[in-house]
Image (spheres, rainbow, N blue to C red):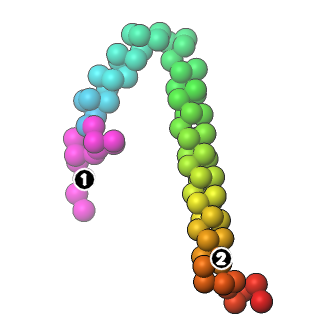
């Protein structure tokens, strides 16, 4: 498979768009604050994913409980 540099895409953006966004971020936040902003952004994304996983776990638990109420306990508990 032949992959060329200009065909690589991340988040639907090509390399040129990524460089432009990086330069704009560098101009806005400056070279000293940019790593802190990136770290905060990464932590926020991680916390969002963790929260989403917890919500999915609760949803599965509630669904299981409702199924047990309606259909009776599953064979695993007997």
Q: Is residue 36 visible?
A: yes
Viewer-nearest residue: 45 or 65: 65
Viewer-nearest residue: 5 or 39: 39
Left/right of residue 44 with respect to residue 6 in the rendered view: right
Q: Residue at x 47, y 11 (%)?
A: 29
Residue that mark 2 sits on:
69
**Label 2 to label 1: alpha-carbon separation:** 54 Å
Left/right of residue 76 with respect to residue 46 in the rendered view: right
CB contact under 8 Å: marks 2 and 1: no
Indicate whether 42 appears above or below 25: below
Prevailing SS of the magenta stretch:
loop
Viewer-nearest residue: 40 or 67: 67
Residue 47 position, x and y percent, is 60, 39
Res 10 → quadrant: top left
Magenta-colored span = 1-13
Residue that mark 1 sits on:
3
Dot 1, how many residues are within 10 Å of its Cα: few (below 14), some (14-19), or many (20+)? few
Left/right of residue 1 with respect to residue 78 in the rendered view: left
Dot 2, how many residues are within 10 Å of its Cα: few (below 14), some (14-19), or many (20+)? few
Q: Point out the image quarter for the N terminus.
A: bottom left
Res 57 → quadrant: bottom right
In the picture, the disc for residue 56 is none
User: Which residue of the protein is positioned furthest toward the right in this rendering?
Assistant: 78
Q: Point out the image quarter for the C terminus.
A: bottom right
């Amino acid at each position: 498979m032949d992959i060329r540099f200009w065909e690589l895409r991340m988040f639907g953006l090509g390399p040129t768009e990524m460089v432009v966004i990086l330069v704009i971020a560098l101009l806005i936040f400056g070279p000293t604050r940019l790593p802190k902003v990136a770290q905060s952004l990464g932590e926020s994304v991680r916390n969002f994913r963790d929260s989403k996983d917890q919500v999915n776990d609760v949803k599965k638990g509630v669904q299981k409980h409702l199924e047990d109420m309606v259909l009776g306990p599953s064979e695993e508990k007997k």
